[in-house]
Amino acid sequence: MPVPSENVCVVDGEFDVAALAGKAVYWFDLGLVLHRRGQVGPARLRLMCEQHVMRLVPDELVLFQPAGFYLVVRSCAAASALPVAQTVNGALLKLFFGTEAAEKIAPLFRVAQIAEIGGRENAGTATSPAPAAERVPDSAAPSETDPLADLAVGSHAGCDGLRLGFLPVYDLRRGTASTFLCTPTRGAPAEPATLDGIDPRVRPSLDVAMLERCLLLTREIAARRLTAAAVAPVSFETLASPRGRRLYQSALRRAGAVENPFLVVKIEDVPPGTPAARLAEIVAMVRAHARRVFAQLPSAQARLIEGGRLGATGLFAKFPDESGPAAIAALAKSLIRSAEAQHAFAYAENVHDALALGLVRRAGVRLASGRALGGGQVHAAAPDVLLSLEKAGARAA
């Protein structure tokens, strides 16, 4: 049996699972490292990880196994443990892939349970505990865990020059932006890009890439103790299709997104006329893996009140550039009425000028983004977002 690290809880020379009941546990799967860094054997990989992790989190428990390791966070309550796992994950990605590449790779860890480690008789010897249904097939792993790298080469229709940035979303009551929407961009300076010409088969990978970029930002937000959120858009069609749903749910599970208070998932491109019951199914599907979910109002005529509760944290509507004052006022009124019926936040996206902003604000909409607010400036990288937050004093108490 492999010898545990020094900071492993031991009773009579063996690992005591019961002593750690109630502690947060994360499984770090190192299969991707072995796959991409073939010259690093399992023994060498363990040594590198052990030295690195012990230096980062000397007070936590680390239990290595052939395919990875468990991190049991003992230094704080389970509800506050996610930033510890995120710190370890970020450090390992940089160690093995470099800073730039690490930003494009999915998290190595997921939430686990003490029970997965097993009893004292097999502690330290078990293999990766993830059920087969939850694991991404090895043949699909490179494209599904690193979709942005696949998109950036320009081999897919509509993806040439595509990058990801963050668009500020303003709280109209406070006049501040502490929420940032991940958005595809092109050009320099970065400008929001439409996805009209993108190959539909690529959209699920793009959605996962935006989720991963948001997760990276939330780690930095947590590390700096900022009060902020990152919004990850996902297409309704991605969640409605079996392949897209599998990809997206797998990415949420791997990241432990359900325990991430800084992440918002935004379901967009909801087809006009989508029944409220169907939208509620899609929302519930995401809510099983993420705390906060915003959903698009299918149309100005949607009768969500009659369709029952959607279960969404917020509702949003996209305001077309060509909309006149009457259309803007009608859409804003429909949005706020539906949001109030759902006990949800109302978010107006693509508010293009001062007149539209005034109408949206007058209707009582809480959140808004677009050219009418700060020129619609897109932050090209996470450090720009963090600097903006720190300047705005978004420091948690």
Image (cartoon, rainbow, N blue to C red):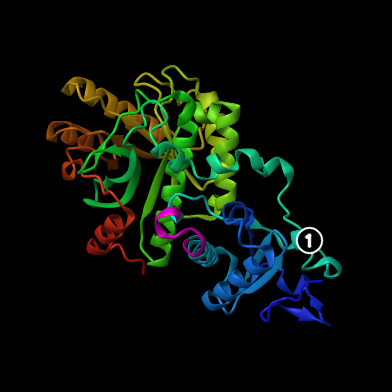
Give residue 314's quadrant in the image: top left
Residue 92, image x and y in percent? 52, 64
In this picture, residue 18 sits left or right of residue 85: right
Q: Which residue does the image show at 35% across and 23% down from the upper left?
A: 197
Q: Relative to 177, is 396 above or below? A: below
Q: Residue furthest right?
A: 121
Q: Which residues are magenta?
A: 94-101
Residue 97 falls within the magenta-colored stretch: yes
Q: In the picture provided, is 185 more to the left or to the right than 56?
A: left
Q: Main secondary structure of the magenta part?
A: helix
Q: Quadrant of the N terminus?
A: bottom right
Identify the amino acid type marked 1.
Answer: Ala
How crowded pointer 1 is (Cα within 10 Å; few <14, some 14-19, many 20+) is rated as some
- Local SS, label 1: loop
Q: Quadrant of the C terminus?
A: bottom left
Identity of the residue drawn at 40% across and 61% down: 220
88 or 367: nearer the viewer: 88
- In the rendered image, residue 24, in percent from the top left (x then y), is placed at 63, 65
| Nearer to us in this view, 239 or 124 | 124
Residue carrying label 1: 126
Q: Give the left or right position of residue 383, taking residue 128 as reference.
A: left
- Tell me where residue 202 appears, x and y as whole percent: 47, 30
| Looking at the image, residue 259 lies above or below residue 325 | below
Whether residue 374 is visible? yes
> Where residue 257 sits in the image (x, y, percent)?
53, 50
* Vertical side of 27 occupied by 72: above or below: below
Closer to the camera, 172 or 15?
15
Q: Quadrant of residue 99?
A: bottom left
